[in-house]
Amino acid sequence: MSVTRGNHDDSNSQPFRRAWAIALCLAALGVAANAGANTSNGYNLPPGVTSLSRDIYALHMEVFWICVGIAVVVFGVMIYALVKFRHSQGAIPDTTLLHSTKVEIIWTVIPVVILVVMAIPAAKVILFMEDTRNSELSIRVTGYQWKWQYQYMDAAEGVNFFSTLARDSNFARQLHSGIDPKTVPNYLLEVDKPLVIPSGTKVRLLLTSQDVIHAWWVPDFGAKRSAIPGFVNELWFRVDPGKEGIYRGQCAALCGRDHGFMPVVVDVRTPDDFKKWVDEQKAALKQAATPGDAAPRSAQVLSN
Ligand SMILES: [Cu+2]
């Protein structure tokens, strides 16, 4: 339905309306720019530390700005029409315009073009995400209620351990523990033994579960995938060299009573440091396998 303007003089209020329309558009753009520009303010996705996370971030921003553009145009036309063709200004509804093939073609073709423009880069990123070929290190990840098991393959074959919620967090989370969670560093985001991986290396995770559906998720890696009993899901990432450090995530599936208490912590090291760590783990493994020698408790390495 469209409306036609009545014969009414409103020339005095036009600059006022224009100022309002400009102010509204500027406010909308300001909010959008603030959401898009700063990634550390908690309003946006983190760009992350892997090529995959950066691609996901770029795609997210591209779609975001397309949405901002659509919103500005649609709301702009709507607000303009609401103000300009309001009843008090003498607008009379045009009841003769019931169907227009031309208009229907336009409002079908434009959204289709916008969707295609968004789908092409999205498909590229999805294909890149699924390409687990030429991985340099594979790690089997098994979800349990409520912990993760990491079993290394390839060069680190044999290294195998469980990663559970850190004791500080575990004590503080108990009912009537008397411990203020705010005093616990990285409350519910700390584990006893993190996953250790090398930077600059294509790491492939083979995800499965021994009980219910869990999901391994580290936002900074742009990595999240379900761990499903009876299935093996693949996931890969390559952390940029120079971005070594500790990265945190959580189980992202509602996997039961203690779902909130199985965090993911990844310790990214340089390839040299990672090799040293693997050698230490293997030495501890060897010692544990030697009859008469007790395994060092701190290593927590279990033999296959
Ligand atoms: Cu879980």
Image (cartoon, rainbow, N blue to C red):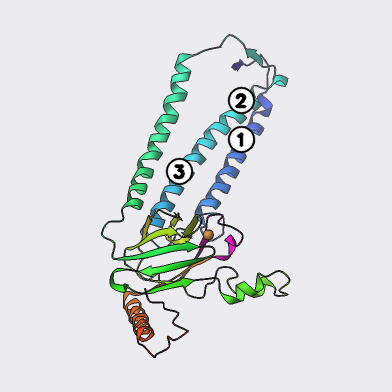
Which residue corresponds to mark 1?
21
Q: Answer above or below: position of 11 versus 221.
A: above
**Residues in magenta?**
249-262
Q: Is residue 150 left or right of residue 24?
A: left
Q: In which quarter of the image is residue 272?
A: bottom left
Q: Residue 81 carries which label?
A: 2
Crowd around label 2: few <14 · some 14–19 · many ≥20 (10 Å): few
Q: Quadrant of residue 74?
A: top right
Identify residue type, mark 2: Ala
Q: Is residue 277 left or right of residue 14?
A: left
Which of the two discs, 3 and 2, labels the residue nearer the N terminus? Answer: 3
Q: Distance between the residues labelled 2 and 1?
A: 11 Å
Kind of element beneath mark 3: helix
Crowd around label 1: few <14 · some 14–19 · many ≥20 (10 Å): some
Asked if disc 3 and disc 2 are in contact, CB closer than 8 Å, the reply is no
Find residue 282 and report its horizontal and vertical position in percent.
Answer: 34, 80
